[in-house]
Amino acid sequence: MSMADGEQSRNPGSRGVSDARDTAVGARDARDPQGTTGEGTDAEESDAARRRRRAQFLRELHEAKQLRDRVQPRRARAARMRQQMRMRTFRW
């Protein structure tokens, strides 16, 4: 078994996420041409586009965390326990 095969078998779900990310990048490039004119509208569009990209990233991140928790329940439980200890230690 080669190194690439081992990495692929350990992380089977990452392939779908990267494909979706590549597709999103291609779609974003098609939507936002580089040579646009209009200073005020350009800033508003870029801000809206940045918010859209950020929202998409956060959705994908949340989905990836849920998938990891489903696939590795022991790690998820340990992470929950660490978080609880953190919250108990620093009360306000």
Image: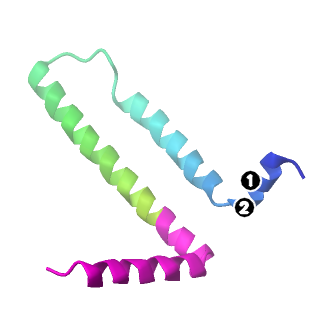
In the image, residue 80 sits, relative to residue 21, either above or below, namely: below
**Measured from the top left, where is residue 38 in percent x and y?**
14, 18
Residue type of the residue flagged with mark 2: Arg
Nearer to the camera, 59 or 86 = 86
Label 1 crowd bin: few (<14), some (14–19), many (20+), radius 10 Å: few
Between 84 and 1, the one lying in front of the other is 84
Residue pictured at 21% horizontal, 41% vertical: 48
Q: Is residue 26 above or below residue 69?
A: above
Queried whether the magenta region covers residue 87, the answer comes back as yes
Residue type beneath disc 1: Glu
Disc 2 element: helix
- In this rendering, the answer to whether 6 lies above or below 77 is above
* Mark 2 neighbour density, 10 Å: few (under 14) some (14–19) many (20 or more): few
| Residue topped by disc 2 | 10
Whole-percent x, y for residue 87 in the image:
28, 80
Residue nearest the observer in this picture, 27 or 6: 6
Which quadrant of the rendered structure holds the C terminus? bottom left
Q: CA distance from mark 2 to mark 1?
A: 5 Å
Residue where numbered disc 1 is placed: 7
Is the residue under label 1 in contact with that under label 2 (CB below 8 Å)?
Answer: yes
Q: Which residues are magenta?
A: 64-92
- The number of numbered badges drawn on the structure is 2
Residue at figure coordinates x 54%, y 69% from the top left: 67
Residue 45 in the image: state x and y as whole percent: 20, 33
36 left or right of 63? Answer: left
Residue at disc 1, secondary structure: helix
Which label is found at residue 59?
A: none
